[in-house]
């Protein structure tokens, strides 16, 4: 069911046949992806399927083992993390990576001289400006991380597990903030383990299984193929590591997952 | 007795300067710099050599300080390049190797015979309560205090300081936020090199000794840093002064004086037994 | 049967490689003794003595992972003891040697006790300050016999230069052999375990403190022996040989050459003495030798652990034979019924009552209670960050809960440290694999069950692991995880906590592993608490599933009931509901 990525003339980020290894093991194997300005591409998949490693490869946290990453048409595959950042890439890593012993305001200062825009995005943080990030709630910490990202004035924002351990109401608040960023023309690549909400929010979607894209298309299209999604998402494919595309055994436990 | 305490203040101030530098570097770069005192000794000895050749004190001192800064920055960049993702034992091991190399280089260039270092404000002293306090003692203590205050200010109140703290907590995240890792690293190492050199020039004019005896000021300085739990600048300063004073007071009785060299160890022992009294697990889950 | 198995992968005697190496070593020593002139004999003898101290660094740093900066102080203790005995008694030199080692051993324990809880940085600083204190207080007054001019003499049969060289070579060889054997023994394997993870060591029921202390004391004794030989070589020694900087220098050359293997220690000794000599032959100053070691040490460390000797060994094994992927044992045959030790009962084996944990403002666990019955699986599921791993830490003793109790088979274990819980039959595995890569599969399993569990061969075939002699380093991440689970299970614990055992396993491997896991409760009567992301695995193994969300139990029941609960669907699958 895999289709090649739509040719996207307005793609702010394109990933072409990207391979990334971790500890000498291939984890991401030949992924193609695109993110358009002002739109969200959702990256789905069960745990351990290579979603975080893919983002690490795109951002340069882990060097890629093959393929290309284009930011606004320019090849950034060989650039350092900092060069990529300077060219407009921001990366929100998994697990609320606040600097714990810095205050909220100091966390923002690391990214930019003036933290105003972050406080505009999350006015609820104003009263917490001088509190150490370590003593914030999980939701507030995630706000700090997103706020830092917006201060970087990126063209594309990679977000790994926005909803990790957060209550649904807080997740909605985060998604609202991301929507604000989209309105400014930022392209977002959002990794999620919760398929339903992410597909409702995103414009495009790709499902990763064993490091390869097994399902890709417009978010509503992916949503309208529950069997494919379920099979890919549960990772119950019996395929060989080299060619996992699409092959499924289709008999994953049916009492629990998506039936949307 | 009071004379001894005042004498201890001079040495204690020196320990404090290096102890504080060690703490700064550990907090900001995650490395325990066993060569903190040697790096300073390079600057002090180089300054003394220039002074002997007829340079005036200030320009000799400036060049000496610059040498220490350069060595410190070089070591820092080496660590940032090779060991930025290594675990603690590897970094500590590498630091020991670097220290051994620096000691050897120091012996090579300066030999290990004691030499005189220009005395700042020779002869200046005053008397408090019947005890003579030399200007050198006051200067050492002032340098220690200035180090704590200036470092504290830079780290807490400037954006560069904030970025440096961010690097020390999560280097990759800081880099992803656009913080220039190498430049900031060089800054921290350069600053501690500067403090060590200034401190060592002051100390050496106060407590003359051989290159190795200056380099070995690292032992009491480590005890001072330990008192600060490698975190607190002000506790490390107090710790350094405490070690100096206890050492001096221990020569009050000839029988105690024999054990003077064990003072840093005994203090470290007590501090560690206290701070490590609870079971603590290694970091990795 | 068991003994024979044991002998195959962890012999307490010698291996063939040991025999070859020993023969070469003896031949080289005899050849040198027969041909070298007194100058070279002296130089090489002192190289052997330096190598002895390097061996002690290998034990403490390369095996146990502890950074000690006072090895030359231990050597000095040995030298001091021999000097004192020589001055005060008429004991023969041969009798002084073990006494010197014993004194250093004792000092090692004395220094070790306060340093027990220290690791890494604190230990390095502590030992550094200790070595400075010893140098200034004990050694500075001069060694016994120094003033009196009372020279220590080697035993009569070793009084010639060549004789004493051979004597040192023999002692170094014996020590090297003893250390090699010790490394493969349980004691030595625990050192490797504590080096890789203190948590995993404690979770296997072993005292971390005892393990570190034994490494410290053994290493001190070896260094002491080196010091005792040094006095006999020189007749009289001075404090200059035992300064802190000497300890740092020998550590540096040990890092460079990789003293964790005997040949690395030998090279460290040889080059430590020969390089200065070569330098002066070249008309260069000798004192740049430490700079060479410094550069070499830094380079070696930046290339990964093990130094030159590890790199050489890797090269030899690559040249020797192509590294084939270790063959897996044949698919497990059903286990014999006689292994059924405990009948499946209905008694609660693991009872967790009202456990709470908070980190700052985050409530990681909120009044969690659950019970695992003997011989059953209970699955714990929930989204990332729901508190599952925190639960494992609390139950296994690595985290203290605020209130609540953990009861294992009727015994309240809430206040016990992890190793005591493990000894009472409460085992766990870790999400991050913690199997020490320096061991073999069999060596690890033997540690994990401490010789009380299933025979290793049987365990290997049950979990389809590679054969027992396979090094752990040759296993992929997934197989290491299976190995860790296997180790925890075959110790026949009353209860075991498996923290995401299936993560990262795919396809056939995963299927086989899940089948092997399914046999655990019925075969051993163990109560299994299974933390798992994979809902299929939970559904296929567990009678009961418990769902955690924000640290609270939000549902419990059969997996199918729980997974159709709308609250669970909302929490776990993130439906906006």
Image (spheres, coloured by chain):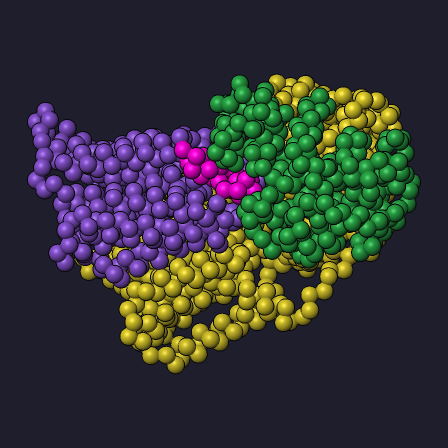
Chain colours: A green, B purple, C yellow
Q: In the displayed structure, would residue A205 be above or below residue C87? A: above
Which portion, as a residue range, is magenta? Answer: B158-179
Q: Quick one: C8 or B269, which is closer to the camera?
A: B269
Please identify the residue farthest to the bottom as the structure is shown: C35
Please identify the residue farthest to the front as the structure is shown: A9
Q: Quick one: C306 or B182, which is closer to the camera?
A: B182
Name the spot of residue C562 as percent of width and height, x first: 84, 25
Find residue C3 and report its image quarter: bottom right
Q: Residue shown at 78%/39% (left/top)?
A: A204
Residue C351 in magenta stretch: no
Q: Residue shown at 33%/37% (left/top)?
A: B20
Q: Quick one: C480 or C183, which is closer to the camera?
A: C480
Magenta stretch: helix, strand or loop mostly: helix
Q: In the displayed structure, would residue C356 be above or below residue C542? A: above
Q: Is residue C449 visible?
A: no
Q: Is residue C231 visible?
A: yes
Name the spot of residue A237 as percent of width and height, x first: 85, 46
Name the spot of residue C52 as percent of width and height, x first: 42, 61
Q: Residue shown at 55%/49% (left/top)?
A: A83
């Amino acid at each position: 069911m895999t289709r090649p990525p739509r040719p996207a003339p307005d793609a702010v980020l394109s990933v072409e046949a990207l391979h990334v290894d971790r500890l000498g093991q291939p984890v991401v194997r030949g992924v193609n992806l695109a993110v358009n300005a002002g739109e969200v591409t959702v990256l789905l998949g069960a745990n351990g399927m290579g979603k975080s490693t893919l983002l690490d490869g795109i951002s340069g946290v882990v060097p890629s083992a093959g393929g290309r990453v284009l930011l606004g048409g320019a090849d950034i595959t060989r650039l350092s993390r900092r060069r990529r950042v300077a060219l407009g890439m921001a990366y929100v890593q998994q697990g609320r990576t606040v600097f714990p012993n810095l205050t909220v305001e100091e966390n923002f200062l690391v990214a930019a001289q003036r933290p105003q825009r972050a406080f505009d995005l999350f006015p609820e943080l104003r009263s917490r400006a001088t509190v150490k990030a370590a003593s914030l709630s999980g939701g507030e910490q995630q706000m700090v991380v997103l706020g830092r990202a917006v201060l970087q004035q990126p063209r594309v924002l990679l977000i790994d597990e926005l909803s990790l351990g957060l209550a649904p109401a807080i997740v909605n608040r985060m998604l609202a903030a991301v929507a604000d960023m989209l309105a400014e023309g930022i392209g977002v690549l959002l990794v999620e383990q919760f398929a339903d909400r992410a597909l409702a929010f995103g414009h495009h979607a790709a499902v990763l299984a064993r490091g390869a894209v097994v399902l890709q298309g417009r978010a509503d299209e992916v949503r309208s193929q529950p069997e494919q999604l379920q099979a890919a998402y549960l990772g119950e494919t019996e395929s060989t590591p080299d060619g996992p595309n699409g092959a499924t055994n289709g008999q994953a436990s049916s009492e629990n997952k998506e039936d949307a | 007795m009071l004379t001894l305490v005042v004498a201890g203040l001079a040495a204690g101030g020196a320990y404090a300067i290096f102890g504080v530098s060690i703490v700064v570097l550990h907090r900001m770069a995650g490395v325990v710099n066993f060569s903190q005192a040697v790096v300073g000794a390079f600057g002090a000895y180089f300054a003394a050599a220039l002074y002997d050749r007829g340079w005036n004190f200030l320009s000799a001192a400036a060049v000496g300080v610059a040498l220490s800064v350069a060595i410190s920055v070089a070591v820092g960049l080496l660590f940032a390049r090779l060991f930025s993702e290594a675990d603690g034992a590897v970094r500590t091991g590498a630091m020991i190797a670097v220290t051994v190399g620096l000691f050897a280089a120091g012996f090579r260039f300066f030999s290990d015979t004691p030499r005189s270092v220009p005395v700042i404000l020779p002869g200046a002293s005053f008397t408090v309560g019947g005890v003579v306090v030399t200007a050198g003692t006051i200067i050492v203590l002032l340098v220690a205090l200035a180090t704590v205050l200036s470092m504290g200010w830079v780290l807490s109140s400037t954006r560069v300081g904030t970025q440096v703290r961010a690097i020390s907590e999560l280097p990759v995240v800081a880099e992803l936020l656009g913080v220039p890792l190498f430049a900031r690293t060089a800054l921290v190492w350069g600053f501690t090199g500067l403090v060590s050199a200034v401190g060592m020039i002051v100390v050496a004019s106060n407590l003359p000794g051989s290159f190795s005896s200056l380099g070995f000021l690292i032992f009491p300085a480590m005890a001072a840093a330990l008192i600060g739990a490698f975190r607190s600048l002000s506790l490390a300063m107090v710790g350094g002064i405490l070690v100096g004073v206890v050492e001096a007071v221990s020569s009050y009785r000839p029988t105690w004086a024999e054990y003077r060299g064990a003072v840093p160890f005994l203090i470290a022992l007590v501090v560690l037994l206290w701070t490590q009294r609870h079971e603590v697990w290694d970091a990795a889950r | 049967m068991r003994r024979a198995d044991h002998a195959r992968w962890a012999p307490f005697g010698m291996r063939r490689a040991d025999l070859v190496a020993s023969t070469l070593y003896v031949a080289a020593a005899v050849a040198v003794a027969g041909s070298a002139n007194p100058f070279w004999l002296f130089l090489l003898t002192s190289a052997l003595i330096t190598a002895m101290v390097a061996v002690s660094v290998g034990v403490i740093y390369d095996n146990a992972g502890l950074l000690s900066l006072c090895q030359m102080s231990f050597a000095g203790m040995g030298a001091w003891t021999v000097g004192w005995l020589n001055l005060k008694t008429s004991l023969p030199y041969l009798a002084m040697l073990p006494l010197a080692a014993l004194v250093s051993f004792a000092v090692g324990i004395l220094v070790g006790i306060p340093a027990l809880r220290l690791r890494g940085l604190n230990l390095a600083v502590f030992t550094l300050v200790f070595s400075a204190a010893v140098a200034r207080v004990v050694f500075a007054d001069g060694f016994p016999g120094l003033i009196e001019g009372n020279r220590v003499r080697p035993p009569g049969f070793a009084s010639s230069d060549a004789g004493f060289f051979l004597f040192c070579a023999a002692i170094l060889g014996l020590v090297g052999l003893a250390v090699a054997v010790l490394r493969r023994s349980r004691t030595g394997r625990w050192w490797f375990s504590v080096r890789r993870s203190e948590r995993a060591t404690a979770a296997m029921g072993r005292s971390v403190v005892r393990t570190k202390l034994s490494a410290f004391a053994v290493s001190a004794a070896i260094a002491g022996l080196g010091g005792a030989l040094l006095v006999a070589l020189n007749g009289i020694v001075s404090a200059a040989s035992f300064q802190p900087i000497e300890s740092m220098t020998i550590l540096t050359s040990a890092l460079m050459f990789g003293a964790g293997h005997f040949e690395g220690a030998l090279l460290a000794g040889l080059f430590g003495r020969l390089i200065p000599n070569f330098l002066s032959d070249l008309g260069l100053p000798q004192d740049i030798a430490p700079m060479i070691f410094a550069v070499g040490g830094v380079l070696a460390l930046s290339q990964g652990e093990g130094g030159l000797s590890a790199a050489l060994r890797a090269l030899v094994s690559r040249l020797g034979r192509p590294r084939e992927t270790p063959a897996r044992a044949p698919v497990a045959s059903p286990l014999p019924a006689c292994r059924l030790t405990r009948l499946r009962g209905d008694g609660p084996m693991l009872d967790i009552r009202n456990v709470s944990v908070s980190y700052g403002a985050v409530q990681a666990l909120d009044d969690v209670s659950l019970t695992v019955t003997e011989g059953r699986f209970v699955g714990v599921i929930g989204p990332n960050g729901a508190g599952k791993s925190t639960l494992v830490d609390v139950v296994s003793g690595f985290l203290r809960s605020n209130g609540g109790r953990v009861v294992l088979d009727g015994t309240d274990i809430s206040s016990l440290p992890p190793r005591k819980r493990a000894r009472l039959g409460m085992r766990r595995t870790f999400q991050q694999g913690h199997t020490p890569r320096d061991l073999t599969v069999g060596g690890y399993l033997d540690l994990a069950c401490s010789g009380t569990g299933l025979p290793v061969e049987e365990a290997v075939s049950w979990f389809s692991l590679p054969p027992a002699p396979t090094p752990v380093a040759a296993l992929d991440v997934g197989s290491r995880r299976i190995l860790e689970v296997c180790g925890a299970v075959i110790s026949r614990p009353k209860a075991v906590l498996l923290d995401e055992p299936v993560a990262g396993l795919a396809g056939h491997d995963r299927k086989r592993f899940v089948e092997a896991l399914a046999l655990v409760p019925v075969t051993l009567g163990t109560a299994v608490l299974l933390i798992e992301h994979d809902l299929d695995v939970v559904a296929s193994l567990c009678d009961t599933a418990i769902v955690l969300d924000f640290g609270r139990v939000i549902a419990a029941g059969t997996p199918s009931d729980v997974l159709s609960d709308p609250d669970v669907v909302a929490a776990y699958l993130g439906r906006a509901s």
